[in-house]
């Protein structure tokens, strides 16, 4: 029961975290075509309330949940390998935020459209493309978690029995 609970927690938190990352990815083409003032407005008003609180809690929870799950399945091959892959992807996702996204947030957060720096497009691209990479890593993490269960699911289940 403990393993099933941890698997559910890890999958749900990873899926919720991936949802926010996927939203960034889907918004990216449109946001790359707006001017600096609009992009700054979106950065300062759209993301802090929900992405910065709910999204951050889900992301940290996903990392903790998947690391705990990896510990629980450490003797279950090949489930452990898939769970470890998920953990590595989520840790990389989290690290990418602190290395490339957070500095842009700190730089752009206090600015106004009139005080945008000349390199605002480079900062925007760093922010947007890092979020795109994070989305891909989180998609891989979720797939790996699902595969960690599927590799333990019997292929041939007799009729009338649940897997």
Image: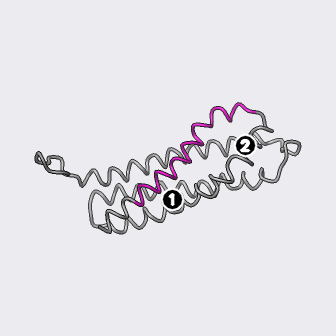
Prevailing SS of the magenta stretch: helix
Frontmost residue, 89 versus 41 = 41
Disc 2 crowd rating (10 Å Cα; few below 14, some 14-19, many 20+) is few
Q: Reading the chain from its start, which is encountered first: label 2 or label 1?
A: 2
Mark 2 to mark 1 CA distance (whole Å): 27 Å
Q: Which residues are magenta?
A: 9-34
Q: Which mark's residue is nearer the viewer, 2 or 1?
A: 2
Query: With respect to residue 56, does 135 lie above or below?
Result: above
In percent of width and height, residue 148 lies at 32, 54
Horizontal placement of 70 versus 117: left or right?
left
> Is 10 a magenta residue?
yes
Residue drawn at point x = 59 percent, y = 58 percent: 56
Q: Which mark is residue 72?
A: none
> Is 19 a magenta residue?
yes
Q: Element under label 2? A: helix
Query: With respect to residue 64, does 127 lie above or below?
Result: above
Horizontal placement of 84 versus 157: left or right?
right
Q: Which residue is mark 2?
A: 42
Label total for image: 2
Residue drawn at point x = 48 percent, y = 59 percent: 62
Frontmost residue, 126 versus 109 = 109
Query: With respect to residue 46, does 31 lie above or below?
Result: above
Residue drawn at point x = 53 percent, y = 58 percent: 58
In percent of width and height, residue 102 lies at 68, 55
Assign the N terminus to one quadrant of the image.
Answer: bottom left
In percent of width and height, residue 67 lies at 43, 65
Q: Which residue is mark 1?
A: 91
- Residue lying at the far front in this picture: please name it: 160
- Residue lying at the far right in this picture: please name it: 114
Residue drawn at point x = 52 percent, y = 52 percent: 17
Disc 1 crowd rating (10 Å Cα; few below 14, some 14-19, many 20+) is many
């Amino acid at each position: 029961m403990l393993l099933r609970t941890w698997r559910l927690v890890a999958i749900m938190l990873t899926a919720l975290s991936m949802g926010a990352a996927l939203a960034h990815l889907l918004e990216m083409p449109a946001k790359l075509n707006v001017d600096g003032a609009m992009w700054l407005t979106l950065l300062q008003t759209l993301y802090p309330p929900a992405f910065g609180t709910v999204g951050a809690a889900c992301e940290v929870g996903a990392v903790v949940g998947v690391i705990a799950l990896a510990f629980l399945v450490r003797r279950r091959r090949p489930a452990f390998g898939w769970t470890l892959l998920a953990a590595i992807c989520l840790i990389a996702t989290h690290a990418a935020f602190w290395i490339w996204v957070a500095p842009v947030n700190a730089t752009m957060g206090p600015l106004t459209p009139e005080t945008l720096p000349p390199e605002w497009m480079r900062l925007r691209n760093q922010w947007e493309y890092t979020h795109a990479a994070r989305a891909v890593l989180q998609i891989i993490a979720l797939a790996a978690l699902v595969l960690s269960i599927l590799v333990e699911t019997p292929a041939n289940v007799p009729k009338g029995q649940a897997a």
